[in-house]
Image (tube, rainbow, N blue to C red):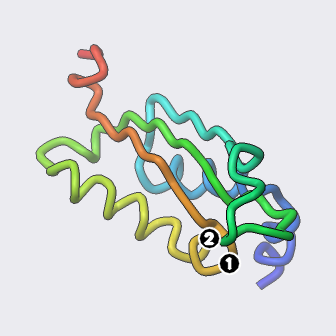
């Protein structure tokens, strides 16, 4: 799969954005790398990879879903990242109505 090789070269933040945008059709998607705040933690000691992220996402696909279900949707979409070094994810997941949209 040629795209997988190219995708592996993209930053983790770019891959996260692409996966979430494609699946959830987000109207707002912010992905912030906060790995530098956790550089001394035992779980990431010696790691040079992007390991900690804050994600804010507004998606119509969250409509009717509990907060737990919304987070599960995000974690499921990022399962490959979680298995390859993504250590922590802070998620804010809202519907357009909750975010002040129509």
Q: Would residue 11 appear left or right of 15 to someone viewing this image?
A: right
Does 80 sit above or below residue 96? Answer: below
Whether residue 47 sits left or right of residue 102 in the image: it is right
The answer to whether mark 2 and mark 1 are in CB contact below 8 A is yes
x 69%, y 70%: residue: 42
Q: In the picture, which quadrant includes the C terminus?
A: top left
Q: CA distance from mark 2 to mark 1?
A: 5 Å
Q: Nearer the viewer, residue 87 or 80?
A: 87
Q: Residue at x 29, y 26 (%)?
A: 96
Question: SS of the residue at dot 2?
Answer: helix
Number of marks drawn: 2
Q: Residue 83 appears at what percent x and percent y? A: 60, 80
Left-right relation of 45 to 61: right
Residue tagged 1: 84
Q: Quadrant of residue 63?
A: top left
Mark seen at residue 81? 2
87 above or below 66? below
Up/down of 47 relative to 12, above or below? below
Dot 1, how many residues are within 10 Å of its Cα: few (below 14), some (14-19), or many (20+)? few
Front residue (pair 47, 11): 47
- What residue lies at 32% left-to-right and 63% top-to-bottom? 72
Label 2: few (<14), some (14–19) or many (≥20) C-alpha neighbours in 10 Å: some
- The N terminus is located in which quarter? bottom right
Residue 7 position in % (x across, y down): 79, 67
**Residue 64 image-quadrant placement:** top left
């Amino acid at each position: 799969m040629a795209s997988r090789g190219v995708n592996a070269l993209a930053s983790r933040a770019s891959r996260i954005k692409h996966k979430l945008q494609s699946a959830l059709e987000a109207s707002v998607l912010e992905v912030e790398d906060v790995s530098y705040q956790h550089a001394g933690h035992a779980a990431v000691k010696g790691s040079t990879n992007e390991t900690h992220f804050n994600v804010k996402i507004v998606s119509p696909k969250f409509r009717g879903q509990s907060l737990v279900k919304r987070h599960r949707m995000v974690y499921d979409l990022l399962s490959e990242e979680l298995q390859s070094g993504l250590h922590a994810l802070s998620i804010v997941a809202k519907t357009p109505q909750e975010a002040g949209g129509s």
